[in-house]
Amino acid sequence: MTQHSLQGRTDTELLWFQRRGFIQAAAAWTASSALGPAWAQSRSNVVERLGDVMVNGQILATDQSVQTGDEIVTGPRSTLIFVVGNSAFHMRQNTSMVVERGASITAVSLLRLLTGAVVSVWGKGSARQIVTPTLTAGIRGTGVYTEIFDTQSTARSYFCNCYGVVELAAGNDRELSESSYHQAVFAESTYDGRAALTPARAINHTDEELEYLARLVGQRTAWQISGKKGNKGYVQEY
């Protein structure tokens, strides 16, 4: 296991990939995907669901798929792992987000995170975005972790570019992250109304989570491809 720092999360939330139920569900998903796109599309794109999950205000039904354009909400001690096109998502508990439609029903153009946290792996494709109340991240093919921390005065977003190239924007700040092994920032509104990007350490997610999500969509992380892990770094202004 990789070392990870916890900030408001539990080990149980980070070790979901060790659950027997997920291992079985992931094996079934991978096997069905190997039979071809037509077969894979004939079944739900939900790999695993635990606890209370709502889609567009209704309880997520058994064998129901998550579609682009949906608003998804997980309750306490709940989780949802699903695949849309060549991208995979793991929503943590108490999370609300919208996956907006791109060029096709299986293409996500924008992930709008409203509350909570999500681990996501994105296959190569056209430019897409992850948006929080204080951050916009332009991505292509990458693996990232995004979380919103609520404070008394304003929201504070955490974003880790685990691997890939990401363009970050918060207020007047612009930064380019080119990462092969975890580059993270906090994005928050300052008292004068301008948002600020500040370096952060890797928190609340692990290498193994990214590896398992990548496997669901037939991908590998940057460190799996290179065979080595680098140093956790910070982004550069541009």
Image (cartoon, helix red, strand yellow):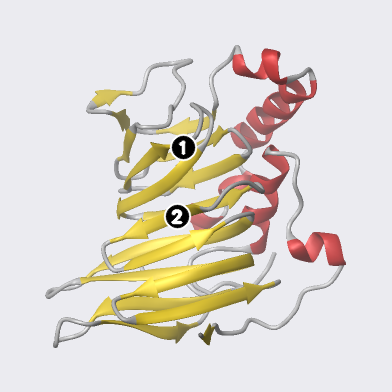
Q: What element carries label 1?
A: loop
| Identity, as a three-letter code, of the amino acid under mark 1 | Gly
| Identity, as a three-letter code, of the amino acid under mark 2 | Gln
In this orientation, does residue 7 appear?
no
The residue under the point 12% across, 75% down is 153
Find out whether the residues at labels 1 and 2 contact each other: C-beta distance under 8 Å: no
Horizontal and vertical percent position of residue 129? 45, 55
Q: Residue furthest right?
A: 227
Residue under label 1, please give it. 102
Horizontal and vertical percent position of residue 152? 13, 74
Horizontal and vertical percent position of residue 71? 31, 35
On the image, which quarter does residue 198 sit in? bottom left
Question: Foreground: 24 or 71?
Answer: 71
Residue under label 2, please give it. 129
On the image, which quarter does residue 99 sit in? top left
* 93 relative to 127 in the view: left or right: left
Of pointers 1 and 2, the one earlier in the residue sequence? 1
The residue under the point 30% across, 48% down is 94
Numbered circles on residues, count: 2
